[in-house]
Image: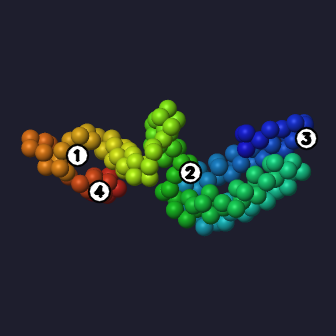
């Protein structure tokens, strides 16, 4: 939406109007997360269709709206699962360091290298989220003498999701 180049006042007006409609829809989704109801869910779905089936006469914007409407189920997942996040910022932040490294080093040379990189990046991120040093975790898994004993990571994830 923000990257769509506009060339005329009519296109700028259309883009601004659609952005406003999307902001209002997002605000409704945020309200729904706090207080979900069937009535509100139906209203948000109807509004989504009105916003993303709209035709503005600006071809680039119309194609973008149609593409986003095609992802309706994914974009409105919060209506089925109110606990799910409205954005992917957490996931994007998790991979940001790897993207930077890949740009600097031009990636891996083999599929095995890529798989190893991805596995260790996931391990490092999971350990970091659980405040565990990755080397302590590896030492514990490999049973290195004198290393701190660390539980399997799935236990920490379960403890975070079920604090009781």
Q: CA distance from mark 1 to mark 2?
A: 34 Å
Q: CA distance from mark 4 to mark 2?
A: 25 Å
Q: Nearer the viewer, residue 149 or 119?
A: 119
User: Where is residue 73 shown, x and y percent of the image?
Assistant: 62, 64
Circle 1/circle 2 CB separation < 8 Å: no
User: Tag 4 or tag 1, which sits nearer the N-term?
Assistant: 1
Circle 2/circle 3 CB separation < 8 Å: no
Q: Nearer the viewer, residue 8 or 85?
A: 8
Q: Secondary structure at mark 2?
A: loop
Residue at x 66%, y 61% (from the top left corner)? 72
Can residue 90 be seen at all in this image of the molecule? Answer: no
Residue 138: mark in rendering: 1
Which residue is labeled 2 in the image? 86
Foreground tag (1 vs 2) = 1
Circle 4 residues within 10 Å: few <14, some 14–19, many ≥20: few
Is residue 146 shown above or below 39? above
Foreground tag (1 vs 4) = 1
């Amino acid at each position: 939406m923000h990257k769509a180049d506009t060339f005329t006042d009519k296109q700028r007006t259309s883009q601004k109007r659609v952005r406003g409609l999307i902001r209002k829809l997002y605000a409704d989704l945020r309200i729904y997360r706090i207080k979900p109801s069937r009535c509100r869910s139906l209203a948000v779905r109807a509004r989504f269709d009105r916003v993303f089936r709209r035709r503005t006469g600006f071809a680039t914007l119309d194609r973008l709206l149609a593409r986003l409407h095609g992802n309706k189920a994914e974009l409105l997942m919060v209506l089925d699962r109110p606990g799910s996040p409205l954005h992917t910022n957490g996931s994007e932040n998790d991979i940001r360091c790897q993207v930077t490294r890949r740009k600097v080093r031009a990636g891996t040379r083999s599929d095995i290298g890529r798989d190893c990189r991805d596995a260790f990046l996931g391990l490092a991120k999971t350990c970091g989220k659980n405040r565990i040093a990755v080397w302590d975790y590896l030492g514990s898994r490999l049973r290195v003498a004198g290393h701190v004993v660390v539980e399997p990571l799935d236990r920490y994830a379960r403890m975070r999701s079920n604090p009781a």
